[in-house]
Amino acid sequence: MFWTQFLGAFNDNFFKSALMMLITYRIGDAAGIDPRILVNAAAGIFILPFFVFAPTASDLADKYDRSDLMRWIKFAEIVVMSGALLGFWLGNVWLLMFVLFMMGAQSAFFSPAKYSILPQHLAEDELIAGNGLIQMGTYLAILSGTIAGGLMILKENGIYWVGGLAVAIATLGWLFSMFIPPTKPIDPSREVSFRIVKRTKEMFADVYPMRKVFGSMLAISWFWLVGSVFLAQFPTYARTILGADESVATSFLAIFSCGIGVGSMFCDSLLKGKVTSKYVPAAAYGIAIASVLLWYVSSRPPVPEGTPIIDAWTFFSRPENFMITACLFVIAFCGGLYIVPLYAVMQTKAGDKVSGVIACSNISDSVFMVLAAVGASVLISLGASIPQLFLTMGPATFIVGLLVGLL
């Protein structure tokens, strides 16, 4: 289960990162479209399936053996990645955009099965550790996939290496899925609905009365909003505020991913297997305080024109940059402590409705990430600096921590 999930998340980000680089440096201009427009469109195309397919994915996860369902989804990934190989070979940006949409769809169908199968195979006191492993694997996969895709695609014959490797990784993930133990279907008589709006309303109507579940879902979505704000700003933050090159931005991504992984795994030691959100408010306060500190230590004069760009070795060798690194790690570490117990609470409190809850959570996460992108764009257009964006996350996350404490 772990390796099936890890390889799927790796492949998503491997392909997405490669496509973004290819659009930016090669095929965007060749297609006669501003690469910046295509890159933003690609981000939206990947998220769109989580809105469209969430209700159907929930129904399928309840109707069938979730391990069988995951095997079919992983087999579909092989087909989709074969389309990616063809798209790279033809240099067809529209085919690659369609493949990106299908990768998003594959992830949208996989997610409810992935999270809802854990309570079927794990005892309640194992859920914290299980979710910690999933979160750690997800962020390490995001990190490694993003770096590998961006580095490989622009090399000589990179398009063939990326396309072929994506197919191979999908095949390996499918082979690992063969070893996921079977589960009993929750509701074999469930009718699979394709009426998206109606079924989505029904799912949210089921979740809303479950106070702790609904609160946990919204709190998780806030985590994805905060995370997307930080991750999206790293390249510009490194270049314009710190006068550093892309290796520093990549290092920030590595620090962030490893911090969340360490925090996720520390949860089990802290909670000793008990499913409780009692430390979640404290983790939110940690994110808030570190965000404010990051704004403070990043409040520097603008980098003068013509100043040489520094690399990661130079940046990290300067003592004044230590606090930036420490703040990023603390934000991520507290993020791991924050999100793992919330997933476990959803899984234990939702009962047989857990797949519907996860589907609703995917929709909510997508909405919050879109709001993050729109909100950040508006604030920047109004003159806010990137450190000021980090500052806004502080008080807002502190308030979220207070609300989680009340729930």
Image (cartoon, rainbow, N blue to C red):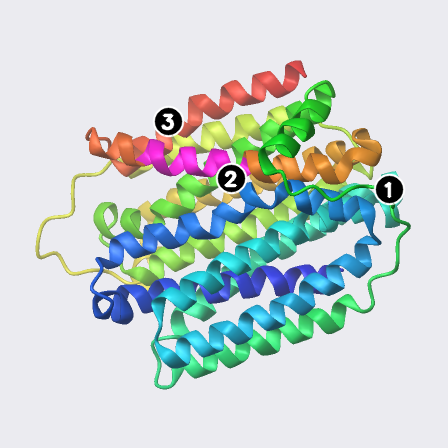
Residue at which label 3 appears: 392
Residue at which label 1 appears: 187
| Residue 1 against residue 340 in the figure, above or below | below
Q: Which portion, as a residue range, is magenta? A: 365-376
Residue at (74% x, 40% y) in the render: 355
Q: Residue furthest top?
A: 406
Secondary structure at numbered mark 3: helix
Residue at (89% x, 43% y) in the render: 123
Q: Position of residue 194 (x, y in %)?
A: 65, 43
Q: Quadrant of the C terminus?
A: top right
Query: Label 1 is placed on what type of residue?
Result: Asp
Secondary structure at numbered mark 2: helix
Q: Position of residue 386 (x, y in %)?
A: 29, 38
Q: Nearer the viewer, mark 3 or mark 2?
A: 2
What type of secondary structure mainly makes up the magenta span?
Answer: helix
Query: Label 3 is placed on what type of residue?
Result: Thr
Q: Position of residue 337 (x, y in %)?
A: 64, 38
The residue carrying pointer 1 sits among few (fewer than 14), some (14 to 19) or many (20 or more) residues within 10 Å by Cα, namely: some
Residue at (50% x, 61% y) in the render: 13
Is residue 367 highlighted in magenta? Answer: yes
